[in-house]
Image: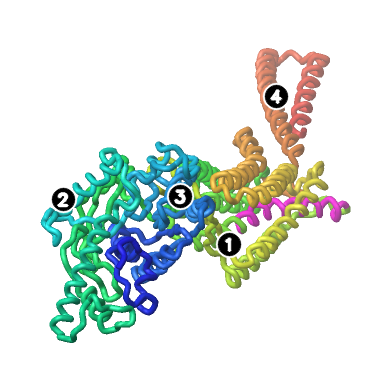
Amino acid sequence: LCYGASSPALSDRSRFPTLFRTHPSATVHNPTRIKLMQKFGWSRVAILQQAEEVFISTVEDLETRCKDAGIEIVTRQSFLSDPTDAVRNLRRQDARIIVGLFYVVAARRVLCEMYKQQLYGRAYVWFFIGWYEDNWYEVNLKNENISCTKEQMKIAAEGHLTTEALMWNQNNQKTISGMSSEDFRKRLNAALIDEGYDINHNRYPEGYQEAPLAYDAVWSVALAFNKTMQRLTEQNSGKNLKDFTYTDKEIANAIYAAMNSTQFLGVSGVVAFSSQGDRIALTQIEQMIDGQYYKLGYYDTQADNLTWFDKEKWDGEKVPQDRTIVRRVLRTVSLPLFICMSTISSFGILVAVTLIVFNIWHRHRRVIQSSHPVCNTIMLFGVIICLVSVILLGIDGQFITAENYPKVCQARAWILSTGFTLAYGAMFSKVWRVHRFTTKTKTDPKKKVEPWKLYTMVSGLLAVDLVILLTWQMQDPLQRRLETFPLEDPISSNDDVKIRPELEHCESHNNSVWLGVIYGFKGLILVFGLFLAYETRSIKVKQINDSRYVGMSIYNVVVLCLITAPVAMVIASQQDASFAFVALAVIFCCFLSMLLIFVPKVIEVLRHPKDKVESKFSNDTGISKEDEERYQKLISENDDLQKLIAQKEDKIRLLKQRLTERENKNTAQPFNEPANGTTAGGMQFNRSSSTALAQK
C-alpha cells in the first residue's frame, strides 16, 4: 500500500495484482475536468504534458473521456524539461483552455514561459494539478534558473484552476483515530515547527499535502491486519499472521480481501478502495484569486454530483471562451458612397430622358434631322441602361440575400454589356458611315445616308452581345463567390473576437474565359472605333453634322475603358475603391457623351427658336451649317428690301397724289414737256427700281 503514487498505470491488476493506494489515481481528475468544461461551455481544449509515464497515461484517459463528451482536443504538446517550444505551439494553435500535466518543477518553467508568450489573463484558462504547495510559483526560482520574477509568476498564475483529490476530511468530526482533521493538522504543524519549518508564513515541506494520506495508509494496514487475524482465528486453521511467508497464498489472499473491503473515516476523508485498488475520493476544485487558492466546489465522481459555491472570478467579469470567436463580416460598399453614385446616376438618367424628349420634340429641326435623331435616341437609351448598371454594381449583401445575389450578377452583366453596345454602337455606326462617305462617295457627294444601315450596324453589334451573354448564362452562369481576408481585430470590442472579412464576387467556373471573350469583342470595337475617329477627325459632312463630336466622344470612351478594365481587376478586393472607380468611369463616359453630342444642338435650338424646316431646302444632300447661316442672312436681307419697297411705294403714292392735284388746277394749261418728261421719267425710274427690288 502506498500513499503518494498517482500513476494510472498502477491500476493495471495484471501488472500490480496486490497494490493499493490511499492517494487517488491521476485519472480521478479527468471526470472533474470534463464536468467543469461542460459547466462553462468549453468544447475545445489543448493539453500540455511532461513526458512522464504518469502524465502519458492520464492524457490517454483524458482523450478518451473528451471524445465521449464531444470535446475537441485541438493540440497535444509534450516536453521533457524545456517547455518553451511546446508553449509557443499552444499560442500558434490558438489554444484558450489548456490542461497542464507536469511536476511542480516543470510547472514553474511552464508558468514563466506562459508569461513570456502572454498566454494568461482574460482570454486563457489553465488547469493545473492541485497537489502543488500553495506557494509553488514563488519558490526556488533562482535555484532552478527561472528567468521570471515572483511578480511576473504571480501575474501569470492568476485565475488558473486546480483539481485534486480531497486530501483532508471536510467535516470537523472525529475520525477512527479519535482526532478530527483539524486536530491532526495542528499536531502536524506543531511537529513541523519543532523541525524548523516556518509554517506561519506558509513555508511547508514538499509532500505536506500527502501527510493525511500517509497517516490513513497506516490505519488501512492496521485495520486490514486486524481483520485478517480475526478471520484466521475464526477459520481454526491453526495459522497466525506471524506465520506469513511470501509463498503463503492463503494468508496473502486473506490480507488482500481484508484490504479490499476496508472502509473507515480517516483524516483524509472516507477511505475505501476500488477493485483496481484505487482510492475512491471526492475531487476538490480551486482557483487562484489574488494570489490565494479559493475553493470553488467538490465533485463526486461516483454520484456525478457537483457541489458549486459560485465563487469563481474571471478577468473581465466574463467566462473566457474556448476559442477566438471568428465573426464573418461581409464587406459591403459604403452606404454614403452608394447613395452618392446612385444619385448622380439617377440625375444622369433624368438628363438622358429629357434629351430623348428634346430629340423627339425637335426632330423636324435641320440640326436634329442631320444628326439622325433615331440613332441619337438609341445612344441615349444605352446611356440610361449604363447608368442603371451603376446602381446594380453597388447592390450587394447589405441589400439582398445570398440566394438572390447570382440574379444581380446576371443583371449586371446583361445591362452593362447591352447598354455599352447601344450607346457606343450608335456612335460607332455614325463614324463608320462618315468614313465610308469620305472613302467611297467622292464621285457622288450628294448621295443620301440611308438610316437603316446605321440601325443594322447597331443591331448586329447587339446580336453578337446577346449570343455571347446567352451562351455564358446557359453554359456557365455567374455565381456568388466569397473572398476571405486575414483575421482582423474588432474596432470597439473587449471580447475575444476576431473579424473574418468576406467580399462577394460574381464569378463562374471559367470566368476568365468568358471575360476574355467579352473584353476581346468590346476591345476590338473600341480600337476600331478609335481608328475611325482618328481617320475622320477633320472631316465634316452635311449628311451627319455631328461627326466630329461623336469622334471626340469615342476618344473619351476608349481611353476610359482601356484604363478602367485593368484597374478594376487589380483593385477588385477593395469594394469601395472598385465600385467608385467603375461607377465614376461609367458616369463620366455617359455625361461626356451627352455633353458633346447634345449640348451644341440644344444651344442651336435655343439660339434660333423660330427656325422651321422648308421643303425646298430639304433636299437629299441635307443642309450644312454654312447653308443654314446663308439662308438666315438671305431672309434678313429680304425683310430689309421688303421694308424699302414699302417706303418707295408710299413715296410713289404721294407723288401721284400731288400730280393729280396739279392736273386739276391746270387743266387748261399744257404741261411743260421737259418737266412732265422729267416727272414721268422719275416715276418710271422709281417703278423700275421697285420692280428690280422685288425681283431681287
Circle 1 is placed at which residue position? Answer: 507
Whichever of labels 2 and 1 marks the residue nearer the N terminus, that label is 2
397 and 200: which is toward the camera: 200
Decide whether the magenta segment is chiefly helix, strand or loop: helix
Disc on the earlier residue, 3 or 4: 3
Q: Residue 183 carries which label?
A: 2
- Give, as a single range, the part of the protein colored magenta: 418-442
The amino acid pointed to by label 4 is Leu
Of callouts 4 and 1, the N-terminal one: 1
- Name the residue that disc number 3 marks: 110
Tell me the distance, in whole angstroms, between the alpha carbons under discs 1 and 3: 50 Å
Placement of 446 over or under 480, stated as above or below? above
Q: Is mark 2 on a helix, strand or loop?
A: helix
Residue 262 % position (x, y): 19, 71
Amino acid at pointer 1: Glu
- Closer to the observer: label 2 or label 4? 2
Distance from the alpha carbon under mark 3 to that under mark 4? 117 Å
Numbered disc in front, either 3 or 4: 3
Is 457 on the left-hand or right-hand side of 310?
A: right
Q: Mark 4 points at which residue?
A: 644
**Can residue 167 be seen in the rendering of this structure?**
yes
Amino acid type shown at disc 3? Val
**Callout 4: helix, strand or loop?**
helix
**Disc 4 vs disc 1: Cβ atoms closer than 8 Å?**
no
- Labels 2 and 4 touching (C-beta < 8 A): no
